[in-house]
Amino acid sequence: MATAYPDPTRRLLITLPAMLASTLVAVDITIANVALPHMQSALSASSDQIVWVLTSYLIAGAIATPLSGWLASRYGRKLVMVLSVAGFTIASALCGAAQDLTMIVVARALQGASGAALIPLSQAILLDINPPERLGKAMALFSLGSMAGPIIGPSLGGWLTDAMSWRWVFFINIPVGLLALLGMLAFMPESRSEKPMRFDIFGFLAVSTALTALQLMLDRGEQLDWFESPEIQIYAVIMAAAVYLSIIHLFTARDTFLRPELFRDRNFAVGSAVRALLGIVIFATVPLVVVMTQSLLGYSAFRTGMVGMPRALGTIVSTIVVARIIGKVDSRIILFFGLLSSAVSMLLYAKIDLYVDQDTLLYIGFVQGLSGGMVFLPLSVMVFATLSDKLRNEGAAMFALTGNLGNAIGISLLSRELVHDTAASRAYLVEGVRPDNPIVQYGMPDFDPGAADVLARLNAEIGRQASMVGNADVYAFVFYVSLAMMPLILFLRPPKHSAHQAPLPVME
């Protein structure tokens, strides 16, 4: 029997609140980053403590994301999404009103847990309400929100922080959240599994423990010198034990929390791996560029945000173009050029120095943004084109989870590389700063190694130069990772179109 799809008007009314909600969560992944120094001062927190504003959000989201698929099957997508967006909006208000560190950390955890279901379930809804010939267009809309959100986040956060205060980074969510909530209540259809699975409490606890330990290890590792710290060692042991129990449980129990049939679909399994690696190639580089622009180039939070806007523009342009050609061109070719665009942008970043001009940053950001639409849209289409309709809730949740884990691992990995490369560069530069070095004598003829103010200025300049070299080395590393990912594309299968299914779409 043919599936009945909503008419175009109702489809639009369902799509708008779903996209508002998912974009809201996507923006909040990065919007608070540029405001952290202001929060630290206002809440009288140390640099180690203020990081928990980000950590609590990520841990709560990691735990709740895989749960969202089961909740939607058991209680219906509409109820889960309505409660999620309501909880996210309330938590945002609490974050903005926080008067101490404890309150904002708890509120951010509630925000992360509430928002975890919104991105995967929004994707599942768009897949359900669109016929096959519009699947690419639906994924284009979803990609615009989920990709542009984290890219726009630092720009919007910088403007709000400079123009008003850091509290508006959270208050801005309230009107958008209320609008999404009203739209969901009015137009979103109910969707519930006729035979929901039982809740696998053991599987959920094992997976949640592994995710929590991993997130803590990633967030705290760099501060505590990784496995030199007993705390990190404990997290690693807990994670290893939880992963072992999860795997044994997955292959020995029935109706498990993680659905093994998801990963029997080759496109879903390979696509999830590619999505995790994109956390290193695309997402993790954005905060790195933001920090470099502020701390090394001396840009304000607002100017840093404006410099990042071409990145979002590039994503929008490439998404619109890809949506027009995705039914006519092999999706793997588009994905290849997306990774190539990312690699080129990283190579260009690796060539800049402390004297780079703003126009160059704008150009490179646009090239980097182009990779977003060319990567995430064809990847989403290929991953879900071969997946059974019955697995969409769980599939969307697991695809989002692998993406979030990839982002977290990518940020941690690149941060570690940056620290180590910067330290190595500094050690190399310091070796040459000697009174008997003819280059020093030529460049600084009045150099007095006994003057404290001279040494302080010299030390600061060496630190800036070393940090810039460290950033360039990290960008070069990401360039090679982008190239190394390209062979994975060959394992993906392009969607097959049957006689009753039109080719994947052309955007009108």
Image: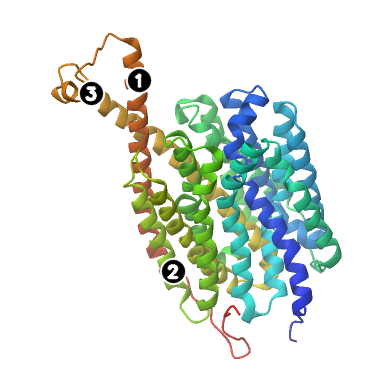
Residue ID for mark 1: 457
- The span from disc 2 to disc 1 (Cα, nearest Å) is 54 Å
Position of residue 63 relative to residue 23, above or below, is above
Is residue 84 shown to the viewer in this render?
no
Cβ–Cβ below 8 Å for labels 2 and 3? no
- The span from disc 2 to disc 3 (Cα, nearest Å) is 48 Å
Give me the residue at 47% from left, 70% from top. Answer: 492
Q: For the C terminus, which image quadrant? A: bottom right
Rate crowding at label 3 as few (under 14), some (14 to 19) or many (20 or more) other CA atoms within 10 Å: few
- Percent across and percent down for residue 413 are 45, 41
Residue type, mark 1 in image: Arg
Residue ID for mark 3: 431
Residue type, mark 2 in image: Phe
Tell me the tag on residue 70: none
Residue ID for mark 2: 491
Q: Relative to 196, is 142 on the left or the right?
A: left
Q: Secondary structure at mark 2?
A: helix
Residue type, mark 3 in image: Glu
Q: Earlier in the sequence, mark 1 or mark 3?
A: 3
Cβ–Cβ below 8 Å for labels 2 and 1? no
